[in-house]
Image (cartoon, coloured by chain):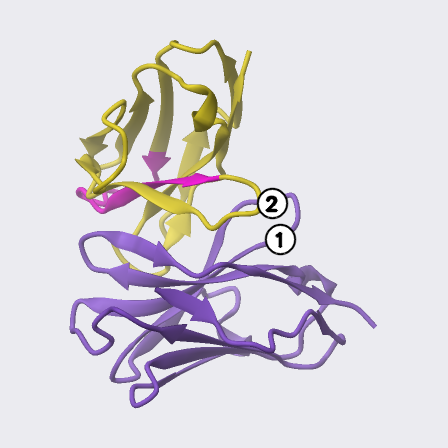
Amino acid sequence: DIQVTQSPSSLSASVGDRVTITCRTSQGVSHALSWYQHKPGHAPTLLIYVASTLQSGVPSRFSGSGSGTDFTLTISSLQPEDVATYYCLQDYGPPLTFGGGTKVEIK
Amino acid sequence: QLQLLEPVPRLVKPSETLSLTCSVSGASFSSSDVHWAWIRQPPGKGLEWIGSISYNGRSYSSPSLKSRVILTVDTSKKQFSLNLTSVTAADTAVFYCARHVSVTAFDFWGQGRLVTVSS
């Protein structure tokens, strides 16, 4: 099984800050990694797929990069509405595995 | 759109079977690029993939749950179902259904419902 290690588990940043979240997979997954935003009481929403493609309707301050085993989600300028938990997912092959999540808060 | 069909069981007794059905509207159900998936989130924990099934019934599931997971699909009704057998308190979670596309991963999600396992 492919393990996904996500870091940090939580972070606190100021509005306007640049925020970076990373995921590392235990073996190469090419570009088969996606990022999700999850707010309490709501279903998760897709932000980024195939590592770096922005899902339609997602603000351009979100971006993704990486391939192989190392991936990054960046929020270029943190906004109050970005408070949420963020997850990465590898779907290179079953079983599909999520990272542990990163809780993002405003300082 | 994906929607969990009512009635959604809110409470299931230990050792019984948890059954959920998700209905799909407004999307191609029988595409070769699409699988229909179940994901859960135990209280205070992260997301966990349970399993996925294609329109023709080909399915795969998490190794940790495989012995207890039954996935089925009804293409005539555009519905897919999860049966999780022999549940314990550890299976208490918010359950989501989602569309899994080979490129765009989980691009549409159902609303999610908390199912509690307790006597």
Residue at which label 1 appears:
B42
Q: Amino acid at mark 2?
A: Lys
Provide the letter of the chain coloured yellow.
A
Quarter the N terminus of chain B occupies: bottom left
For chain B, what colour was chosen?
purple
Question: Residue A12, position in %: x, y?
Answer: 53, 15
Q: Residue furthest right?
A: B119
Q: Quadrant of residue A50?
A: top left
Q: Is residue A77 magenta?
A: no
Question: Residue B7, position in %: x, y?
Answer: 60, 78
Q: Nearer the viewer, residue B73 or B91?
A: B73
Residue A57 falls left or right of residue B63: left
Chain to which the residue tagged by mark 2 belongs: B
Q: Is residue A24 above or below residue A80?
A: below
Label 2 close to label 1 by CB (< 8 Å): yes
Q: Residues within 10 Å of mark 1 (few under 14, many from 20)?
A: some
Residue B45 is tagged as 2
Q: Amino acid at mark 1?
A: Pro
